[in-house]
Image: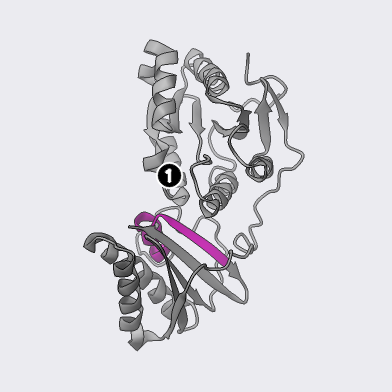
Amino acid sequence: MTLEVGIRRDPHTHGYRHDAFFYSGMDEFIRGTAQFLRDGLAERAAMLVVVSAEKIERLKAELGDGAESITFRDMSEVGKNPARIIPVWQAWVQEQMSAGRPLRGIGEPATPDRRFDELMECARHESFLNIAFEGSEPFWLLCPYDMATLERNVVDEARRTHPSWIADGEGRASDDYVPVDTVAPFSPPLPPLLGSVESVQFIDDEMRLVRELTSKAAQTAGFSRDKEWDLVLAVNELATNSIRHGGGVGTLRVAVEGDRVVCEVSDQGHIRDPLIGRVPPDAAGSSGRGLWIANQLCDLVQLHSTPSGTTVRLTMRA
């Protein structure tokens, strides 16, 4: 079995290559990904694998001594919030470039244990990968999708976010691929908030109300003190952004869903950069700092932005 059949683009000469790998069940996952890694070992590629802990152990057992030259990371740690994954790939690629070796990676963010809103952000992450590495150094990234456990709409979305895909050992260009809309990357609306919602409108001298409402919700959900302050900090950063860049006024809406708190900060700003908050802000911290902090602290960050305004939704669990 080879994972190069049917696709004639050589990632060593054409830069970034991003494939979905459709499989059914653990055995097929191991066969396909292990072959991909063995091919990489044969060409002396630098390789990073970011999948579940169980799959890491299975791959190490399958590859034997060959696994020693491969870097493995647990996706539950790297990608708990899908927006944290791109900077990990970027840092690794940057580290490897001086050696002049071909690069191969495997990343599986979309798994059946994720909630619907998390899978939405996994799809957005996959799409934005094509912006993060477009025209860059030779790097072949394989993204597995288990057709036996994932909903059909998740698999269909993978065909739209990957320029090419592989199944049953054969690869092809995706007829369904949709490039990122760089003019309006966050235009799709967010699902409505569930449960009872409290809200407050704020201006510069009313930030105390923002912090109090967020803190109250965190306590209701049973957050530890540290988690409570993490959520308060994240919301405060976004509310500050609203004051500085979103028209000087904003609205905070908060809902408690059991042990989860969902906070929405809305203003009149418009976000156009698909990678904002997913790459470290510049040294001056003038662009993307608030979203970067929110992504580091929260379990999930979702955006909806049009010329009419922006809503940033933060989710955190106790």
| Amino acid at the residue labelled 1 | Gly
- Res 241 quadrant in image: bottom left
49 above or below 301? above
Q: Does residue 252 show up?
A: no
Q: Residue at x 50, y 27 (%)?
A: 104
Q: Which residues are magenta?
A: 288-304
Q: Does residue 132 show up?
A: yes
Q: Is residue 313 left or right of residue 181?
A: left
Residue 183, image x, y percentages: 65, 62
Answer whether residue 276 is magenta in the image.
no
Q: Is residue 220 left or right of residue 149?
A: left
Residue 148, image x, y percentages: 61, 31
- Give the camera-side residue of 216 and 1: 216
Q: Residue at x 62, y 21 (%)?
A: 3
Q: Residue at x 50, y 15 (%)?
A: 38
Residue at disc 1, secondary structure: loop
Answer whether residue 290 is magenta in the image.
yes
Per the image, the residue denoted by label 1 is 79
Residue 300, image x, y percentages: 44, 56
86 above or below 60? below
Q: Quadrant of the N terminus?
A: top right
- Res 207 quadrant in image: bottom left
Question: Which class describes the residues within 10 Å of circle 1: few (<14), some (14-19), or many (20+)?
Answer: many
Q: Residue at x 53, y 75 (%)?
A: 269
Q: Quadrant of the C terminus?
A: bottom left
Residue 7, image x, y percentages: 70, 25
Q: Is residue 174 left or right of residue 225?
A: right
- Res 70 quadrant in image: top left
Q: Is residue 219 left or right of residue 4?
A: left
